Image (cartoon, rainbow, N blue to C red):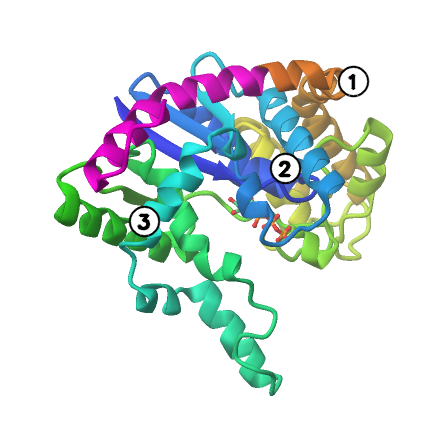
Amino acid sequence: PVRVLTGIKPSGTPHLGNYVGAIRPTVRASRQPQVDSFLFLADYHAMISTQDPARLQRSTLEIAATWIACGLDPQRVTFYRQSDVPEIPELTWFLTCVCGKGLLNRAHAYKAMLDKNAAAGAEPDDGVSAGLFMYPVLMAADILMFNAHQVPVGRDQVQHIEMARDMASSFNHLYGEHFTLPEAVIEDSVATLPGLDGRKMSKSYDNVIPLFAPREQLRKLIMGIVTDSKAPGEPKATEGSALFQIYQAFATPEETAALARAYAEGIAWGEAKEVLFERIDREITPMRATYEELMAHPERVEAILQAGAAKARAVASPFIRQLRHAVGLRPLQ
Ligand code: ATP
């Protein structure tokens, strides 16, 4: 089987864009028989941007419950919280010591901060924590800890996978062949879901539909999607219609074709929105129920994460023992 590793950042409330673009495809991929899927909640990473303990905990719980509700099978998948695996920060240090500082200087996220500061006339490293600077090393440890073969990422993350390969090669060169070199799998195929205003659905545009919005709120939000001012009876264009694009992300090809016909026949916007609402609600309702059930019983989520951590550590713990030996450290009891 191919070991595929995916990190999930516990930040904010998931929206339909996250569901269509990340959660749904990842959950589907994790069900393929030839895939050995490792999925983790990246709470150490979240600490780089959040210093609010209650929010970090709440977010981690919400995101875990979301993924389980969306069909992730914790029996099949190794689903764990990053901070439950202390071998990861230990490996981070091993990799830190074989990672050239210059490599980190070239990381896009860090360079973006430098550019921003330069533009603002500030000191180069203003607002840059060592955590932000070191982020690619922690990410390399996430991947190499489990010898993942494939890491599905957006284009902006490819550089980080290359850096992980670089660290793995350096380590292997110095201490023997311990690490598999991971490959980035670039996900271009997933469509970008538009938000209420037609731009990409994004928290930063404040145009999102929360994935588990209660039914009535979901309806209200959908009724607020921008359309043109064509009257009922006038034919409508599917091209450039946010409503149509969102529908397409949920519907079967047959249903999509039926809506395209209704557009051509001049369906009223209010009616089209009703069709969209019913379609999304049909897909979301069972998941929303599971989500609410889990959020009412956080101990169930915790038990799932604990079981996941045990599975992850069954891999990580013997491997770190091997690595400690390789670098010349005493075995821990
Ligand atoms: P923001 O809402 O602030 O733009 P985000 O929702 O993009 O942030 P991320 O954590 O960057 O949140 O994204 C999580 C995952 O959701 C990524 O895989 C990203 O590609 C996907 N995603 C986010 N927004 C959309 C969208 N509108 N359509 C499709 N996929 C999306």
- Compute the Cα span from label 1 to label 3: 40 Å
**Alpha-carbon span between mark 2 and mark 1:** 31 Å
Residue named by callout 2: 247
Ranked by sequence position, the earlier of labels 1 and 3 is: 3
Give the mark nearest the N terminus, 2 or 1.
Answer: 2
Whether label 2 touches label 1, CB < 8 Å: no
Q: Is residue 125 magenta?
A: no
Amino acid type, mark 2: Tyr
Q: Quadrant of residue 252?
A: top right
Residue labelled with disc 1:
296
In the picture shown, does residue 270 fall above or below 250? below
Which amino acid type corresponds to the residue marked 1 in the rendered image?
A: Ala
Q: Residue furthest bottom?
A: 121
Foreground: 54 or 16? 54
Q: Quadrant of the N terminus?
A: top left
> Is residue 13 toward the left or the right of residue 76 in the image?
right
Q: Is residue 46 above or below residue 310?
A: below
SS state under label 3: helix
Residue 314 horizontal/vertical position (percent): 37, 18
State whether label 2 is within 8 Å of ligand 1. no
Q: What residue span does the magenta drawing correspond to? A: 304-333
- Residue 13 picture quarter: top right
| Badge 2 density bin: few <14, some 14–19, many ≥20, Cα 10 Å | many
Query: For the residue marked with disc 3, what is the amino acid?
Result: Leu
Q: In this rendering, would 195 be left or right of 189?
A: right
Q: Secondary structure at mark 2?
A: helix
- Quadrant of the drawing holding the C terminus: top left
Image depth: mark 2 or mark 1 in front: 1
